[in-house]
Image (cartoon, coloured by chain):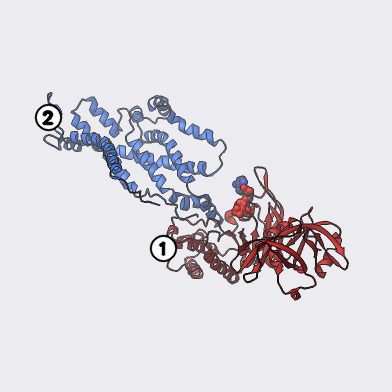
């Protein structure tokens, strides 16, 4: 239920507005700088000592032009997209059923299992990447799509399972039992009751997983290196190595962020609150 | 059609016994109510019959077949949960059809049943609404419709009316009775509301602490409570209890209590000869103590005693009088609105000897044979 906030005095209102403006500033200012750089020409960055202007000086789309005419750019976008979506699919296919079982049934050794799941993420990526890579190389998984998808799945899985458990647990147990008495099999209950009701949670998981894979760098760098398959983050790194103008890097960064925002916006309509309202009294 | 037989059922949770050695047979097509205080194991019984809870010991038979090890989804019963458990993402229509779809019923038949159910429960016009868009009473009817379209042999209802206001509850009770009459299902109904139990069931099973106290028709449970618990639990306002000695004085048998010698009617006198001379607990309903200024209205089997009225509670049509008799015994009785009983005055009342209940304080059971 949405309830109206109590009316505020003008002093309170002012404080609120200042607070909100402050937060917005911290979020938007870097974004603005990023976009600004991406449409600036070199002269507005390398000003030779003069202060960098606040507004883009001679706005230009030349960097975008450069990117969009680079065939490699399309290739990395496609592989990044493919890897991210692959990670979403694989980690959800593995993680959601696991979350269902862990969230709904008494599994012996549940606590240990959960600790084991999260343990991968208890180490910084940079230290877990070495053993993981070594392990993957043993299975010839370096420089392959399935290898990097599996690696990203490894990173995403604990979150998928933990958020999944939470969203399954919020569904009243009576619904499941009611369906069972009506003759539904476990799979039917999962498919027709639990899954649709956990959509908001699953969408959050999907967005999170997509993002995780899309901007993942460390594992991609170790597993793909400078092989045939490259991701957007590796592309950015590669361009940085050649010390290109900052405005090109900013442009790549904008391209790195856009799909994430788009993906989140697409998914947002499924993230409705109060989906189980009205089911049990 | 199916009868449900529970035989020597035991159930405990983590070593705490909830149901101990309970046997109960519900006949085919019967409307039986499980009535008992909160936490006495009513829901647990229902959930065991539905297969949602395992049975520790004992047997469950439905239509003569042992059901202990048949999983819930194969039992073909229908249950209405205490919480209604409507599927929140499905419309009223989808909710009602869910079970039929799961059971792969032919679309034509499905449509026919749906039409029947929404007409029966007055849900026409609400087909496309989601559960959150209908009222509590409507939700309850959807839950009932959803259970009935499955055409189950046995219908299990767990306090389906507990959330309704008095008027809605009344109409829902009528609706349920009508449905039972028209479809003739075996219905096991759980409640802790005795008005519901009294007015709807063919037989009432009174449960307390996981024991079956009495299993009989509503009138029999009210008129002839077999245990002290049933006597105190059924009836409103609750029964008065006094201790006394069962003895014969002259030609009459009765109970010597602090308020006086309460005589039993002839029929009861015969039924209690085996317990003569014993200490007993007497139960008298407030309805069976009457005040009248016409002394001639007294029957031979009535006992006349004197009480001092202390408090009055209005019940609407009548008042409940809390009065004190000899030896500080408190007795409650009912008076009509126009009776002129005054506070702190002595008042003569009659106890109806035909309606007296006598219990053994040790076994807590009725001594009447
Ligand atoms: N899953 C469980 N684990 C442990 N104890 C339980 C469980 N379910 C019920 N109990 C206990 O079993 C007893 C009977 O519970 P049950 O739900 O059958 O009561 P009830 O008669 O339906 O009560 P109410 O009228 O309040 O619904 C209670 O004491 C309860 O605490
Ligand atoms: Mg209950």
Identity of the residue drawn at 11% across and 35% down: A58
Q: Are marks 2 and 1 in contact (CB under 8 Å)?
A: no
Label 2 residue SS: helix
Label 2 resides on the chain identified as A
* Element class at badge 1: loop
Please identify the quarter of the rendering in which residue A68 is found: top left
Give the letter of the chain under mark 1.
B
Q: Is mark 2 within 8 Å of ligand 1?
A: no
**x and y, in percent, of residue B43 in the image:** 61, 54
Instruction: Decide which of A24, B322 is in the foreground and name it.
Output: B322
> Residue A202 placed where, x, y %?
41, 45
Q: Residue at x 41, y 29 (%)?
A: A136
Where residue A257 appears, x then y in whole percent? Answer: 27, 38
For residue A55, side relative to residue A273 (left or right):
left
Q: Residue B109: x, y in percent?
A: 50, 68
Chain painted blue: A
Q: Residue B128's mark?
A: 1
Q: Is residue A238 above or below residue B212?
A: above
Vertical position of residue A23 compared to residue B341: above or below: above
Counting other residues with Cα less than 10 Å from the Cα at mark 1, is it few (<14), some (14-19), or many (20 or more)? Answer: few
Residue B342 seen anywhere in this rendered image of the structure? yes
Residue behind mark 2: A43
Judged left or right of residue B105, residue A134 is: left
State the residue in front, A115 or B83: B83
């Amino acid at each position: 239920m949405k309830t109206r906030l109590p009316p505020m005095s003008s002093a309170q209102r002012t404080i609120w507005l200042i607070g909100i403006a402050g937060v917005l500033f911290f979020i938007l200012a870097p974004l603005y700088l990023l976009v600004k750089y991406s449409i600036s020409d070199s002269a507005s960055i390398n000003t030779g000592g003069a202060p960098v202007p606040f507004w883009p000086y001679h706005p230009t789309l030349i960097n975008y032009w450069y990117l969009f005419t680079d065939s490699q750019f399309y290739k990395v976008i496609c592989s990044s997209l493919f890897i991210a979506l692959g990670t979403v699919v694989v980690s959800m296919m593995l993680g959601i059923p696991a979350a269902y079982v862990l969230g709904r049934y008494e599994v012996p050794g549940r606590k240990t299992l959960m600790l084991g799941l999260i343990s991968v993420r208890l180490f910084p990526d940079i230290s877990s990447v070495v053993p993981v890579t070594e392990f993957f190389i043993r299975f010839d998984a370096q420089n392959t799509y399935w290898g990097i998808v599996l690696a990203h799945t490894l990173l995403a899985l604990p979150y998928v399972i933990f958020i999944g458990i939470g969203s399954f647990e919020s569904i009243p147990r009576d619904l499941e039992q009611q369906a069972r008495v009506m003759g539904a099999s476990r799979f039917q209950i999962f498919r027709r009751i639990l899954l649709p009701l956990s959509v908001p949670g699953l969408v959050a998981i999907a967005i999170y997983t997509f993002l995780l894979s899309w901007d993942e760098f460390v594992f991609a760098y170790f597993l793909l290196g400078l092989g045939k398959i490259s991701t957007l983050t590796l592309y950015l790194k590669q361009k940085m190595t050649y010390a290109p103008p900052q405005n090109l890097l900013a442009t790549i960064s904008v391209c790195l962020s856009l799909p994430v925002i788009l993906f989140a916006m697409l998914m947002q309509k499924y993230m409705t609150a109060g989906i189980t309202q009205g089911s049990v009294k | 059609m199916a009868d449900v037989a529970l035989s020597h059922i035991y159930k405990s949770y983590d070593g705490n016994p909830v149901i101990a050695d309970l046997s109960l047979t519900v006949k085919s097509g019967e409307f039986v109510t499980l009535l008992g205080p909160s936490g006495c194991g009513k829901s647990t019984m229902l959930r065991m019959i539905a297969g949602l809870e395992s049975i520790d010991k004992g047997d469950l038979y439905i239509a003569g077949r042992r059901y202990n090890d048949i999983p819930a989804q194969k039992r073909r019963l229908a249950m209405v949960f205490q919480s209604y458990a409507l599927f929140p993402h499905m419309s009223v229509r989808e909710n009602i059809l869910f079970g039929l779809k799961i059971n792969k019923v032919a679309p034509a038949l499905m449509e026919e049943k749906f039409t029947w159910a929404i007409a029966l429960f007055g849900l026409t016009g609400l087909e496309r609404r989601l559960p959150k868009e209908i009222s509590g009473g409507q939700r309850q009817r959807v839950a009932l419709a959803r259970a009935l379209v499955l055409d189950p042999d046995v219908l299990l209802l767990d306090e389906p009316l507990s959330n309704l206001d008095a008027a809605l509850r009344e109409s829902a009770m009528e609706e349920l009775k009508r449905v039972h009459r028209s479809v003739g299902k075996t219905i096991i109904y759980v409640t802790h509301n005795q008005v519901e139990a009294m007015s709807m069931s063919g037989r009432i099973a009174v449960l307390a602490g996981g024991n079956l106290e009495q299993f009989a028709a509503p009138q029999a449970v009210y008129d002839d409570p077999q245990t002290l618990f049933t006597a105190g639990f059924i009836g409103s306002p609750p029964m008065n209890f006094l201790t006394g000695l069962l003895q014969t004085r002259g030609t009459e048998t009765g109970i010597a209590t602090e308020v006086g010698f309460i005589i039993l009617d002839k029929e009861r006198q015969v039924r209690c000869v085996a317990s003569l001379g014993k200490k007993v607990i007497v139960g008298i309903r407030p309805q069976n103590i009457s005040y009248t200024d016409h002394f001639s209205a007294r029957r031979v089997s009535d006992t006349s005693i004197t009480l001092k009225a202390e408090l009055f509670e209005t019940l609407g049509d009548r008042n409940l009088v809390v009065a004190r008799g000899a030896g500080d015994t408190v007795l409650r009785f009912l008076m009509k609105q126009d009776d002129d009983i005054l506070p702190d005055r002595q008042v003569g009342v009659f106890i109806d000897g035909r309606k007296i209940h006598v219990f053994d304080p040790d076994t807590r059971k009725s001594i009447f044979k």
